[in-house]
Amino acid sequence: MVPLMCPLNVDHEGVEVLEALPDGRNKAWCPNCDYAWVHGADRLHSARMTAQPTPRPMPTADQASPELMARAQLLKSEFLSQEHAGLDPRVPSFWAKYQRIFSEEGLSAAGPAELRAFGTDTSGSNLGIQSTFLTAFDKDPEYGAARVRKVVDHLLRGTGKPLEDRLTNLVNGTLSFSFPGFKELLLSRVLSVMYPKRFLTLLTYEQKLVAARDVYGLHLPPYDRARIGHQIVQSNDLLAGLAGDGFLHRPHAGEFLWWVQMQPPGGN
C-alpha cells in the first residue's frame, strides 16, 4: 500500500488514517502540520455517476386508449371488407423470390443485381430513396453483394446472440461486415419477408412509434441506440398483437395500421 503523503508538505512521516469513510475514502491527519483531509476516490459517487439510466419500458396492450381501440376495431372491419384490403398484388411473387434468395441454400448464390433490387423494389413496402445503400453498392457491386450476403445471413442465422442483439449491432453498423445504408429499414424488410407471420411492414421504429400513438394512444420509449433492436422487435410484437387476427399475415396488418392513420380523426 502506498503511504499517504501530506498535501501541505509532501511528507508521509507520521501521517495517520483517522477513519475509513463509507464511500471508500479515508480521513487522514498529518501531525507535523496538524492538518486533516479526506483522501481517495468517492466510489459511491462514481458508481452513481457511471450507472446507466433504467430504460423506459415498452407499454403493454392493456394500456391502450379504450376509445382508440374501439375506433380501430370499427376501422378494421371496414378495412377487411374492402376488395383486396390494401394488399399489393406484387407481394406474393416478391416474397417467394426473396425467401428463396435469403434462404441458407440460396444466399451464397445471390447475385449483385438481385441484392441491389431489394433496396429499390417497392413491392409491399414504402422504401423512400435508398441513396446511401445504392451509392455504396454501385461503387463495387461484387463487394457490396458479398457484404449484404454476410449482413443478411447474420441477421437471420447468426449464433451466440438473440435476434434483438444482432439487429442492434447491424442497425448501428458496429460489425466488421456492416454495409452503408443496409440498416434499420432494409433489415426490417428482410424480417417482414422472411417471417411474414410475425413482422409488420412498418419498417422503422419511428413508424411504429407514430402508429402506436395515433392508432392506439400508446407512447413508446424514445429511440435508444443501445437497445434499438429490442425496441424494433418489441414494438412490432406489441402492434401486431393489438391489430389482432383476421389478416392474411402480419404485413397485411401493417397495411391496416398505415391505412388507419390516414382516416379522419374520430371517423370510420
Image: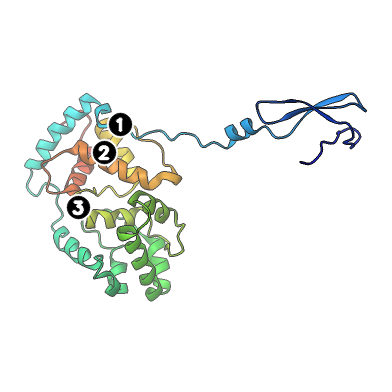
| Marked residue nearer the N-terminal end (3 or 2) | 3
Q: Which residue is mark 1?
A: 218
Q: Are marks 3 and 2 in contact (CB under 8 Å)?
A: no
Of tags 1 and 2, the one toward the viewer is 2
Q: Amino acid at mark 2?
A: Leu
* Identity of the residue drawn at 62% across and 35% down: 46
| Label 2 packing within 10 angstroms: few (<14), some (14-19), many (20+) | some
Residue at 13%, 57% (x, y): give it.
89
**Separation of marks 1 and 2 at Cα, in angstroms:** 10 Å
Element at label 2:
helix
The residue that label 3 is drawn on is 196
Q: Residue at x 43, y 35 (%)?
A: 55
Q: Which residue is mark 2?
A: 238
Q: Which amino acid does the dot numbered 1 rest on?
A: Leu
Quarter where residue 60 is shown: top left
Do the residues bearing badges 1 and 2 touch, measured as CB atoms within 8 Å? yes
Residue 9 in the figure: left or right of residue 104: right
Position of 181 with respect to 26 (left or right) is: left
Amino acid at dot 3: Pro
Q: Nearer the viewer, residue 109 or 140?
A: 109
| Residue at the spot 32% in from the left edge and 62% down from the top edge | 152
Upstream in the sequence, badge 3 or badge 1? 3
The tally of labels here is 3
Q: CA distance from mark 3 to mark 2?
A: 15 Å
82 sits left or right of 98 in the view = left
CA neighbours of label 3 inside 10 A, class few (<14), some (14 to 19), many (20+): some
Alpha carbon of mark 3 to alpha carbon of mark 1: how far? 24 Å
